[in-house]
Amino acid sequence: MKFSTKGRYAVMAVCDLARHDDGRPVSLAEIASRQKISVSYLEQMFAQLRKARFVRSVRGPGGGYLLAIEPDQIKVSEVMTAIEHPVRGNSDDDGMFASRGCSDDPTKALWEEVGRQVLGYLDQVTVDDIVSGRIPH
């Protein structure tokens, strides 16, 4: 399972768009300032988020980004998958819950289950849940 800084920042940025949705596009500079993420890093992420159709861009003066989907329809797991390509909960991965070392690792099943539980939880949490402070327990 891989949860990189890029995935975390993508969720933060999408939540920022949802929180500041007043019908006008939000510039990456505004998001960068509020979330303390570099504009160049956001540009990379937003290219992926646009390709995954979570956001749409508006060009020209006053341009920026808007959510393309309602916040209550965007699952955190989907944002992570769009950025991480894909988030998986298995021992073949090289991330946080990966089983490292020998092929008969006695903890392999434990980490696989932890990964499945985390992914299951992220699949239940929407951007709206985060923005409104209703994160499920």
Image (cartoon, helix red, strand yellow):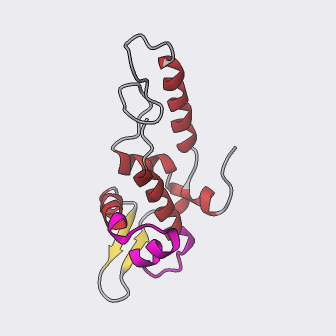
Q: Residue at x 50, y 31 (%)?
A: 115
In the image, 131 versus 4, the foreground residue is 4
Q: Which residues are magenta?
A: 18-41
- Image coords of residue 2 (percent x, y): 42, 39
Vertical side of 57 occupied by 13: above or below: above
Count of labels shown?
Answer: 0
Q: Is residue 49 magenta?
A: no
Seen from this angle, which residue lies furthest bottom? 61
Instruction: Identify the image quadrant of the N terminus.
Output: top left
Quarter location, residue 40: bottom left
- The answer to whether residue 113 shows anywhere in this view is yes
Q: Residue at x 51, y 37 (%)?
A: 119
Seen from this angle, which residue lies furthest top? 104
Tell me if 22 is positioned left or right of 7 in this view: right
Vertical side of 133 occupied by 67: above or below: below
- Image coords of residue 117 (percent x, y): 56, 32
- Image coords of residue 39 (percent x, y): 36, 71
Quarter location, residue 131: bottom right
- The answer to whether residue 70 shows anywhere in this view is no
Q: Residue at x 62, y 56 (%)?
A: 129
